[in-house]
Amino acid sequence: MAFVNGLKCRECDREYPPEALNVCDFCFGPLEVVYDYATISEVISQDRIAKGPLSIWRYRDLLPADSDDPVDIMAGFTPLIKARNLGKQLGLNNLYIKNDSVNPSFSFKDRVVSVAATKAVEFGFDTLACASTGNLACSVAAHAARAGIRAIVFIPSDLERGKIICAAVYGPTMISVEGNYDDVNRLCSEIADNYPWAFVNINMRPYYAEGSKTLGYEVAEQLGWRLPDHVVVPTASGAMFTKIWKGFNELACLGMLDGVESSSFGPDQNTVHHPAVTTRMHMTQAAGCAPIVTAWESGSLQVMPVRPDSIAKSLAIGNPADGIYSMRVVNKSAGTAYAVPEEEVVPGIKLLAETEGIFTETAGGVAISGLKHAVDSGAIKPDDLTVVYITGNGLKTQEAVESVVNPLTVKPFMGAFEEAFNQRGG
Amino acid sequence: MGKQRVKFSFPEDMVKEPVIHKLGHDYKIVTSIRRADVREDTGWVILELEGEDAEIERGLAWVGTTGVRVDLVSGDIVDG
């Protein structure tokens, strides 16, 4: 069972029952899940978690789902890899990669959709829906298949073929929308208001977003119940960024980290900051769509929407719903925010692939190039324990790195091979 | 009659313009401000619009021509 008291508006604190709602009726602020942490603290333990499944559902005490049978395609518990080669290249001795590109549908979206799909089934919805530029559509279609309910995914008509196939294979109803980005947004918003469907990132959003906390839990558990000095996170809406921070602080407040005393959550569960949580949160966006970084750099408390023009389409959210909240996390954690130049996204992808054997999509290129900048600028020191989050698989954005294909073509004879091989310089 | 929840973002040169007043005056739309943060150089307003769907669409199209950006309240719907 879930230890959930209800939903609460993040702006005006009005309370709501735990239903399929995402916006406060009064001030239109976002709704967040409110937990019964007093009861959670009585049941949760490192041992209890260790005995759980090798998926996000090992942390079910901290997730907002009642069901004992969640919609689980084994999302999460992805590898945390010590990146010796990349670390050496960047001058870091304690660098780790959280490789979330190996989730079942090949992105971190499986974490959030697993929670949203579970809630959708609990609420009695028969349709799981989303509007997506790729990763989310794949995950929604996969989880709906697992749950045995209908999936309807909306995609922009110019979406890359590879991403369309990745989602289509699970058998959703796929709606290809002709129009620009704003047209797609507007249409899907209207549809969500008029059809009784569970839109994972609209009416399921309070529950959906909570799935990203598991990115924080897992890193802590895999590091032996301690937190890193730094994390580097590719950012779009800002929701994942804030939830990783929330996950770290929940663990600290519940006394789940080694050597850390539990403490009260205080009046606002979403902004709680346990003094033992000293992880610095570094946000990276691609320069072609960096509204949060722009606001942070200018010292503004307002995130002005932008029209996305970036190679990193999975990060291309011009009007980020959690922009202001993620900026507060950057400030509270003494972190940084950096806009990676568009021309450094692909080099980031290649650097990770060539040093650690991990093929990430464009968002991962933004993370790696952002990490490099954080090191070069002195924000991250050589011995600092650093984790960089890789959130999607490179097979989905192969066209971004097509230029790497440059084989040595030879006739099937030893002489021809040696001549060509020696000419290339081995 | 329909309702729509929107966010207007004002660039510096539009902060002093009475866009919301004109929207209510020139179109048959009732505007209800729910939250706002307006400063000297920039600002945003979250509001609910009530009126005929076509009139709201016409009004928002006009707002878009002024340089004020119109977005959905809950951020972008299209996700990665």
Image: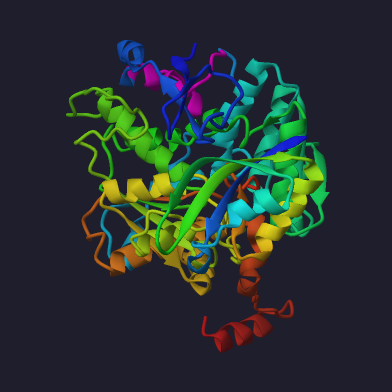
State left or right for residue A232 relative to residue A66: left
Toward the viewer: A28 or A112? Answer: A28
State left or right for residue B75 relative to residue B61: left
In the image, is residue A333 above or below residue B15? above
State left or right for residue A50 relative to residue B12: left
Point 73% across, 28% down: residue: A197
> In the image, residue A73 lies at what x, y percent?
62, 29
Residue B33 inside the magenta-drawn segment: no
> In the image, residue A254 lies at what x, y percent?
28, 22
In the image, is residue A54 above or below residue A363? above
Whether residue A38 is visible, yes or no, is yes
> In the image, residue A195 lies at what x, y percent?
77, 30
Residue A62 inside the magenta-drawn segment: yes
* Part of the protein shown in magenta: A47-67
Whether residue A97 is visible, yes or no, is no
Quarter of the view holding residue A340: bottom left
In the image, is residue A222 above or below residue A68? below
